[in-house]
Amino acid sequence: MDYKVFTKPVHVTTWMGLFLALVAGLAAFLVPQLKHAFMANAAFNGVIVFVLAVGIAVNLRQVWRLQREVLWIESFQQRPEIEGLRPVLLAPMARLLASRKRGQAHLSPASMRTLLDSVQIRLEEQRDLSRYLIGLLIFLGLLGTFWGLLVTIRSIGEIIGGMSVGTDPVAMFEALKSKLDTPLGGMATSFSTSLFGLAGSLIVGFLDLQSGHAQNRFYNELEEWLSHITRLPSSTGIEGDGNVPAYVQALLEQTVEGLDRMQRSALDSERERRTTADHLAELNTQLGRLAELVGRESRDLSALSTSQEDLRTLIRQLAQQPAQGAQFSEDLRAELRLLSRTIAAALGGSGTNRAQ
């Protein structure tokens, strides 16, 4: 299996971090103006800022989830037999390749396409939330705009309805000035919500763009890696016919996979048979050594028994001829010395055999 180096998705977070730092610096430079615009309708603008924070967190999480998948693929390429970090996005592929050994992880084209489609669907599902948050920010901005316009129009209508023609122009102008606070507040709400909504959608949209680039790069590299472990169907006579039904091709692929599994099982059985034969040969050798040791000990015990019989005979002779005690005593000492040497030799040979 060729080792494939995947691009680390963490590199994308560098661009995200630089962009967020730039936005934070610009917001810090415009703090007085932004604070005044935010206080025009703190509740509505607070909701927009909260949705913006959620969108930033969602996009960063998407990139970090790709990092987990890349680490699993790299660990699987190096040592597939060790179970370490379990993937989430590639969980079906991990279960499929879990029982495969290194160099034997082969996929059929149909399995490869199924896995890629599954990964693509999961990637799209992850981006659905980010796209929804972008639309939600735009919707909240427009909603605040229309809300402010409604407040402004209603306030202007009330002002016009309360004006009388016959009054003093100066007094009428002063009354008009005092009543303009409400429509101006509605216009402030309209413009501030539009500002925060559109700016938030711009920020989340850029992060979603970077996250999409990371996901597309990961998908392309995954497809390239899977193409290296995919076994194409062998060129047979039926392959030349372009009208082969799909179920026949799938049946042929399953047959080939079954034959491969049978071949691997036969190889494993042959290795186990050889290992068993080696163990039996070693056991036979040990049994031969044990039989040899038992034979040596048996001979030593026979020699010891013979010496004991000679000693008994000598004692009987000594008991039958008490007058010749001195002569028999010398013979007895000689026989005892011979017996002690025999016993010592027997015990020494037995200890040596046991040590061997």
Image (tube, rainbow, N blue to C red):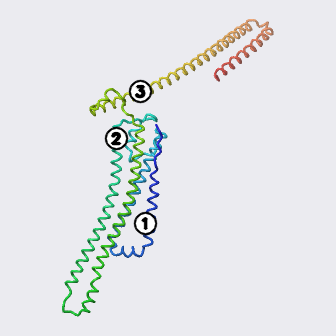
Which of the two residues, 251 or 324, is positioned nearer the viewer here?
Answer: 251
Kindly state the secondary structure of the residue where label 2 is placed.
helix
Task: Answer with left or right where residue 96 lies relative to residue 166.
Answer: right
Residue occupying image coordinates x 74% and y 13% = 338
Q: Amino acid at mark 3?
A: Gln
In the rendered image, residue 110, in percent from the top left (x then y), is placed at 33, 37
Which residue is identified by label 1?
23
Q: Amino acid at mark 1?
A: Val
Find the distance from the CA under tag 1 to the CA under tag 2.
41 Å
Find the distance from the CA under tag 2 to the CA under tag 3.
26 Å
Residue extending farthest right: 326
Which of the two residues, 288 or 275, is positioned nearer the viewer here?
Answer: 275
Q: 10 Å neighbourhood of mark 1: few (<14), some, or many (≥20)?
A: some
Q: Are marks 3 and 1 in contact (CB under 8 Å)?
A: no
Q: 10 Å neighbourhood of mark 2: few (<14), some, or many (≥20)?
A: some
- Of callouts 3 and 1, the N-terminal one: 1
In the rendered image, residue 129, in percent from the top left (x then y), is placed at 33, 56
Task: Answer with left or right where residue 208 lies relative to residue 179.
Answer: right
Mark 2 vs mark 3: in front: 2
- Of callouts 1 and 2, the N-terminal one: 1
Which residue is identified by label 2?
113
Q: Which mark is residue 263?
A: 3
Quarter-of-image position of residue 198: bottom left
Residue occupying image coordinates x 31% and y 61% = 135
